[in-house]
Amino acid sequence: MKTLLKAITAVVVIGLAFWAYHENYRTQEALSKTEQLQSDIGVARSRLAMLRAEWAYLNRPDRLRELADINFDRLGLLPLSPEQFGRIDQVAYPAAPAAPVLDFENAVDVSAEEADP
């Protein structure tokens, strides 16, 4: 009986060691993936910062004004004037939809309250 108990204990210890070995390698793999993702996030953030700086540089008002002046003949851009805007009473709003007609002929009462006699 003691040898059977020792054999079972040995098998359980070997099984637990095998499980711990695999969990250790799975944990190391997960940590490696996490470090790689953190590195990728850092690279993406630095690229985003660079793109934002480029966007701000390209959208400088003096640069855009110069481009508009250079391409005036092709674009035909003119400054806005008050006459180009309309009044609110000139806006044609769509008519409100008619209220739906409800048919109660074949209605079923589904309330939990008892009906009045």
Image (tube, rainbow, N blue to C red):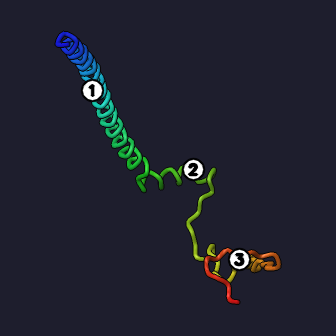
Which one is nearer the viewer's eye here, 40 or 62? 40
Residue 10, position in %: x, y?
A: 20, 13
Residue type at tag 1: Thr
Which element type, helix, strand or loop, lies under badge 1? Answer: helix
Question: Which dot marks residue 71?
Answer: 2
In the image, which disc is placed on residue 94?
none
Whether the residues at callouts 1 and 2 have beta carbons within 8 Å, the answer is: no
> Left or right: where does residue 53 sit relative to residue 28?
right
Quadrant in which the N terminus appears:
top left
The picture places residue 85, in percent across and down from the top left corner, at: 62, 75
The quadrant in which residue 34 appears is top left
* Along the viewing direction, whichever of 58 and 28 lies nearer the viewer: 28
Give the residue number, with chain letter if any, for mark 1: 27
Q: Amino acid at mark 2?
A: Asn
Residue furthest out toward the right: 105
**Quadrant the C terminus occupies:** bottom right
Q: Residues within 10 Å of mark 3 (few under 14, many from 20)?
A: few
Q: Residues within 10 Å of mark 1 (few under 14, many from 20)?
A: few
How far apart, in angstroms, are the residues tagged by discs 1 and 2? 60 Å
Disc 3, SS = loop
Near-viewer residue (50 or 10):
10
Query: SS at mark 2?
Result: loop
Are the residues at dot 2 and dot 3 in contact (C-beta closer than 8 Å)?
Answer: no
Q: Residue furthest front?
A: 1
The residue positioned 58% from the left and 76% from the top of the image is 82
Residue 70, placed above or below residue 117 = above
Q: Amino acid at mark 3?
A: Asp
Residue 95 falls left or right of residue 1: right
Which residue was labeled with disc 3? Answer: 109
